[in-house]
């Protein structure tokens, strides 16, 4: 991952208002919650101590901001699966398996079948290395 997260002192000051101004759904889940002193990050989700509710990555998929990210990744990958080249039923997969990390270099277009295969392989011993190899090879092909 190329993003580094450098926190300011304000990120620890709980007397400040939440960075989202009470509307976490409007921040597009673009790591705003991660820098907020009122958020607790745990297992791919954020719990907001001000709003007393989890802010899960799943919540973002209906948001305009996520749809813009998804559209840009599909366009970058030429609206094709990066593994098999299929053009239908496309998904955007988080390579590092962190659904909150929407950095473009962490996202890849996969068809429904390749996406399911990737997740099945990731669940097996040694599967992460195999999947990473396939993604690296597909990245080389995409950039030619």
Image (tube, grey):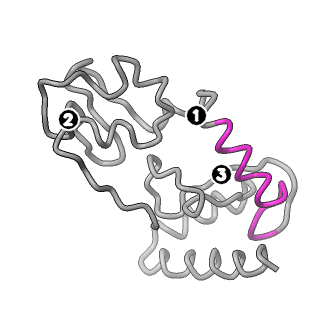
Kindly identify which residue carries mark 3.
Answer: 92
**Pair 1/2: label in front:** 2
Q: Residues within 10 Å of mark 2 (few under 14, many from 20)?
A: many
Alpha carbon of mark 3 to alpha carbon of mark 1: how far?
11 Å
Question: Within the image, what quadrant is residue 95 found in?
Answer: bottom right
**Pair 3/2: label in front:** 2
Q: Is residue 59 above or below residue 120?
A: above
Q: Is residue 31 above or below residue 38?
A: below
Closer to the N terminus: mark 1 or mark 2?
Answer: 2
Of 57 and 3, the residue lying toward us: 3
Closer to the N terminus: mark 3 or mark 1?
Answer: 1
Outermost residue to the front? 9
Residue drawn at (63%, 28%) of the image? 64
Alpha carbon of mark 3 to alpha carbon of mark 2: how far?
30 Å
* Location of the N terminus (image quadrant): bottom left
Q: How many marks?
A: 3
Of 12 and 48, the residue lying toward us: 12
Residue drawn at (84%, 66%) of the image? 85
Residue 37 is labelled as 2
Q: Secondary structure at mark 3?
A: strand
Kindly identify which residue carries mark 1.
Answer: 61
Q: Which residues are magenta?
A: 67-84
Residue drawn at (34%, 17%) of the image? 22
- Residue 132 is left or right of residue 8, and the answer is right
Q: Residues within 10 Å of mark 3 (few under 14, many from 20)?
A: some
Provide residue 94's location: percent of width, then percent of height: 54, 56
Provide residue 135's location: percent of width, then percent of height: 63, 74
Q: Is residue 73 magenta?
A: yes
């Amino acid at each position: 991952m190329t993003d580094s997260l450098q926190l300011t002192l304000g990120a620890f000051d709980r007397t400040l208002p939440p960075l989202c101004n009470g509307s976490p759904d409007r921040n597009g889940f673009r790591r705003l919650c991660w820098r907020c002193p009122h958020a607790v990050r745990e297992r791919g989700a954020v719990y907001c101590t001000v709003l007393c509710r989890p802010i899960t990555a799943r919540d973002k998929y209906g948001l305009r901001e996520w749809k813009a990210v998804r559209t840009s990744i599909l366009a970058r990958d030429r609206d094709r699966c990066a593994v098999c080249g299929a053009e239908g039923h496309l998904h955007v997969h988080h390579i590092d398996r962190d659904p909150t990390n929407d950095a473009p270099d962490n996202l890849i277009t996969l068809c429904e079948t390749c996406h399911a295969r990737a997740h099945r392989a990731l669940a097996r011993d040694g599967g992460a290395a195999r999947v990473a190899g396939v993604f690296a090879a597909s990245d080389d092909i995409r950039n030619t």
